Image (cartoon, rainbow, N blue to C red):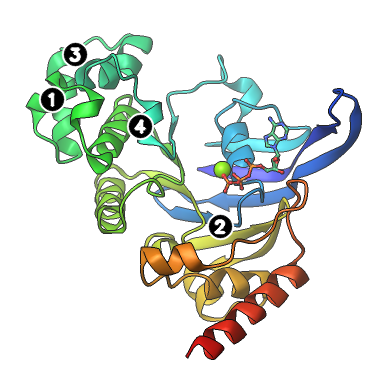
Amino acid sequence: MLEIRNLSKSFPIRNAFGRRIGEVKAVDNVSFSIEKGQVYGLAGESGSGKSTIARMIMGLEKPDSGDILINGEGLADRSSGHSRAVQMVFQNPGSSLNPRRTVGQSVAVPLVAHSYSGNRQKRVGELLEMVQLPAHFAERYPHELSGGQKQRVAIARALAVEPKLLVLDEPTSALDVSVQARVIELLSELGQQMQLTYLFISHDLSLMRNFARSVGVLYRGQIVETGSAASVFENPSHDYTRLLLASVPVISEEEEAMRPKIPLIDGEMPTAETLLALRQSRQTEHHERG
Ligand SMILES: Nc1ncnc2c1ncn2[C@@H]1O[C@H](COP(=O)(O)OP(=O)(O)OP(=O)(O)O)[C@@H](O)[C@H]1O
Ligand SMILES: [Mg+2]
């Protein structure tokens, strides 16, 4: 369904006066593929290049080099760069829905864009029911919905034009933990019903473990580990993967708030060594606290 070959993308780094002083390799020679109907998980810390890959797949950003094939077809072959076969669900449902549009109007946007010929209102109702919302929610405005409900609306909108591939960029990270699992469950059910292929981007490895069949771990723009979710998570071979896994269990929000944040120097990713050292000092601290 999706094949990514040797994909690379760099961005210029500029100083305060706008002068180019270097470049960051946001995506560095990345290759992976997803079979039809499968879920591929892309994991990695903030800044590792996940969204840049997503944006290139969506045709929102041009790769420096490499190929993106969807159903064997290159991006250049797709007319407007925005194909109905590929849709995306973004991290923040609050900002991806227009606050001045009703839910129904938002869900109908892709129907209008792709000149849907059937009864639009009926289709909107069906789509809302597909994501387990009552059809009358079409009359509501985003501010009248919870975070999880908004994300369901965003999923309904993405499904409106019957895509083959859904790119989910941190689809649940803005949601409460209890709601996250239910949204993943819904995506999983819909995927099976509609034979959807998913690229699931997340830094939450516990969610990924349950959802993705195979995973790739990104570190500074490169895939440092890949394989079945079971093998990568049960038996990680790379230090960075082990570190990501070690930071999974979060017991409470207070604990999370107390965790030292990883220092970012000039927006640069810390090295794996720094991260490991931090992790170890964190553990020592934990032992000392009792
Ligand atoms: N338009 C841009 N201009 C300059 N640099 C960019 C641009 N977009 C991304 N970058 C840089 O590319 C790198 C990868 O960014 P990206 O957004 O892909 O990371 P990410 O893995 O999605 O992170 P997060 O988990 O925080 O969403 C970062 O160093 C980022 O600063
Ligand atoms: Mg991102």
Relative depth, front residue between 38 and 8 = 8
Under mark 2, the amino acid is: Ala
Q: Amino acid at mark 4?
A: Gly
Disc ID at residue 120? 3
What is the distance, in whole Å, between disc 2 and disc 1 at their CAs?
34 Å
Tag 2 or tag 4, which sits nearer the N-term?
2
- Judged from the image, the secondary structure of the residue bearing numbered disc 3 is helix
Q: Give the residue at mark 1.
A: 125
Query: Dot 2, how many residues are within 10 Å of its Cα: few (below 14), some (14-19), or many (20+)?
Result: many
At label 3, counting other C-alpha atoms closer than 10 Å, the crowd grade (few under 14, some 14-19, many 20 or more) is some
Identify the mark nearer the N-term, 4 or 3.
Answer: 4
Q: Quadrant of residue 25?
A: top right
In this rendering, the answer to whether 53 lies above or below 216 is above
Instruction: Locate residue 275, reporting x and y percent.
Output: 69, 69
Q: CA distance from mark 3 to mark 1?
A: 9 Å
Residue 16 is situated, as x and y percent measured from the top left of the image, at 84, 28
Dots 3, 1 in contact, CB < 8 A: no
Tag nearer the camera, 4 or 1 = 4
> Is residue 149 something that shows in the picture?
yes
Numbered circle sitting on residue 94:
4
Is 212 positioned to the left or the right of 181 in the image? right
In the image, what residue type sits under mark 3? Arg
- CB within 8 Å, label 4 to label 3: no
Instruction: Kindly identify the amino acid type of the residue bearing the numbered disc 1.
Output: Gly
**Residue at x-position 36% and y-position 34%:** 93
Instruction: Say the numbered circle drawn on residue 43.
Output: 2
- Counting residues from the start of the chain, the first of labels 4 and 1 encountered is 4
Q: Residue at x 46, y 62 (%)?
A: 257
